[in-house]
Each structure stands twice: as C-alpha cells, then as structure tokens.
Image (spheres, rainbow, N blue to C red):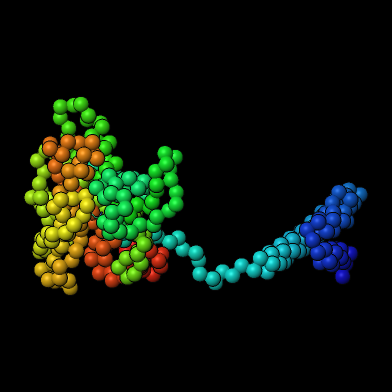
Amino acid sequence: MNDLDQLVQAAQADFGVATSPAELENAKARYLGKAGRVTELLKGLAALAPEEKKARGAEINATKQRVEAALQARRQALADAELEAQLKAESLDVTLPGRARGVGGLHPVSRTLERIEQIFGSMGFDVADGPEIETDWMSFTALNNPENHPARSMQDTFYVDMKDAEGRWLNLRPHTSPMQVRYARMHAAKYAGQEHMPEIRVIAPGRTYRVDSDATHSPMFHQCEGLWIGENVSFKDLKSVFIDFFRTFFETDDLQLRFRPSFFPFTEPSAEVDIAFNSGPLKGRWLEVAGSGQVHPNVVRNFGLDPEKYIGFAFGMGPDRLTMLRYGVNDLRLFFDGDLRFLSQFKS
Ligand code: DAH
C-alpha cells in the first residue's frame, strides 16, 4: 500500500468516527482544508520536475476524489441516520386512516322550514322572525287569552319567575302565535293614517317550548305561524292556501283536506286541519297537521286594526310533524338527539 492509499484509508477512518455533521466538517478540514493533507500534497507538486509533476499530480487528484467520495458517503450516512432517528421519535403511523373532511348537510327539520318558506313565499307571504323569550302579554293576553284563564293550559309553557325591564312577565313562547301580534302591529303602525293598507300576509317559523316529552312531543319543537289579514279574506282563501301548500309540500295532488271544528281563544270559528293521502303507506288515515281559524275580533283590535274593517285567518302548523310524515320518521326525539347515524341519512 503506497502513501496515497494510506491517506485515503486514514480519511475513511476519520470520517467514519465522526458522529455529527460538525465533527465530519472538522475531519474534512484535516484532509481537504487549506492546510489539509491532500492540499499539502498538491502544494508539494511545485517542487517536482515537469514529467514527475504530471504523473504525481494525476495520482494526487485521484486520491482527492476518493477522499471526497468517502466524505460524501459519510455525509449521506449521517443524514440517513438522523432521519431514521427523527422518524422513530415522532412515531408517525402512516397506516392510520386519514381524517376525511366530513361533508355536512341540512338538518331534516331545517329542510322542511326552508321548503315551507319557499312555498309560502311563492304565494306572496313574507317570512318573519321573532323572540323565543316572550312576554306574557304577547304569548297569551293579546291573543284573547286572559290572565288566569284555563285555556292558557292548552299551551303549557315553561313559566319563569322573571320580568323584563318594563315589569312584564316573561316566558319561553309556547307557540309562534305571538308573532301574529308583533308583525301585525308593526304593519298597522306603518300604514296608520293612510288611506290604503296592503294586506298582511306572513308566516313566522321558529322554535317553541312546552312542558311535554314523549315520542311525538319534545319540550323544544318547531311551529310555523301564518296570518293573512285584509278587507275581504275568508275561510275559502284559507282552504285554497292549505290545499296548494300541502300538495306542493308532499309533491302529490292525491291528498284530501278537511276542517274539523275546534277551539282556540284567538280564532272564531276555529278548526283543526287534517290531511289524508289517497295512496302510499299512510293511505286513508286522517292526520292532524295544523290549527287554524278566523282571527278573533279582540285579536284584530290588539293588532291595532278595526275588526269591522279587517278580517282574515291565522294558522299554526308543526314543521316537525310534517318532517316525520314526509320522511316516514316515527320518533320525534330522533330529530333532537344529534345522532349522526340518523342525521346523515338526510345529507344529499
Ligand atoms: N297556537 C296554536 C297552538 O300552538 C296553533 C294555532 C291554532 C295557531 C289556530 C293559529 C290558529 O294561528 O289560528 O296550539
């Protein structure tokens, strides 16, 4: 083995014991640096005769290349080891399933509410929104349901021992009917003193609350109020609105509608609205879908309107119930449990 082979061997050994990139750079300097062994050899060439210089020069250059190759190999080995250590330390398990971006969808009841708004919107109804914490006056008194009257128990709400800043008792609204009063009063005030008042045509969907809980009742549920007031609005109009609505909502003309006499303090006469499908799984069964009636003169007065001049109808229906019928769901509580196995079936 000549001196150059020994030099390469020594470099390989030196590089081999370097355990970090910094140590390796120090070792490199000992061979390839300004005063390194290979550099010294190259400098020594100057003293040689031209012929000798050529042969020795070629050998030294070959040696330099071998030293550089050894350096490069060790650099690579150190980098590989570092990556290996990092991978171990971070213990990333690439075989785990990825976290997919879940695609959400509208809640089935929200779908129904959108549908109701869209259908009534096409019939010229405005859509109004109002407070869920309501005053006793709006929830009951204004709707011809006097304080301490037993008819208040028809909408058994959560009473709370709380008054608003003006000393009015508050409750969680047991129905959306107070929205009739809120909307109509606003409308009446807007056109007060004017010769002509456009008709009031509005629906008010939203959350309502009652002390009730079983497969078909939830303490929080939805209602959609409707109100149509004008100078010449009758039960005939109510019937045609309902027929159009239910046929469009259930996408079938093959259903019947009936009014069944009933009682509500805020309407006179009052009626429950039932529908029956002429085909399908619910064929022939009368299903109650809404309460309705001609708005009581006392309520029209509370709207700020003259009951001798203005007349019309109101209704309240249950979007939760409509959703159950439309999708064939038999337990209302499923809507509010938040179970994705149920909800994701309505995604598309
Ligand atoms: N508010 C009634 C309820 O919750 C439903 C209702 C019946 C609303 C008749 C109306 C109506 O507007 O005219 O039971």
Task: Report the label total.
Answer: 0
Q: Residue at x 36, y 62 (%)?
A: 211
Looking at this rendering, what residue extends furthest in the left direction? 236
- Seen from the viewer's position, the closer of residues 181 and 336 is 181
Decide if residue 267 is on the left or right side of residue 69. left
Q: Is residue 314 above or below residue 256?
A: above
Answer whether residue 177 is visible to the viewer in this image: no
- Seen from the viewer's position, the closer of residues 188 and 161 is 161
Q: Position of residue 9 (x, y in %)?
A: 84, 67
Looking at this rendering, what residue extends furthest in the right direction? 47
- Seen from the viewer's position, the closer of residues 78 and 270 is 270
Q: Residue at x 27, y 44 (%)?
A: 142
Q: Residue at x 38, y 52 (%)?
A: 172
Q: Residue at x 40, y 60 (%)?
A: 103
Q: Quadrant of ligand 1?
A: bottom left
- The image quadrant where one finds the N terminus is bottom right
Q: Position of residue 248 (x, y in %)?
A: 16, 56
Decide if residue 41 is on the left or right side of residue 299. right
- The image quadrant where one finds the C terminus is bottom left
- Seen from the viewer's position, the closer of residues 161 and 178 is 161
Q: Position of residue 165 (x, y in %)?
A: 44, 40
Answer whether residue 271 is visible to the viewer in this image: yes
Q: For residue 324, which quarter of the picture?
A: bottom left
Q: Is residue 309 above or below residue 151?
A: above
Q: For residue 305, which quarter of the picture?
A: top left
Q: Position of residue 11 (x, y in %)?
A: 84, 63
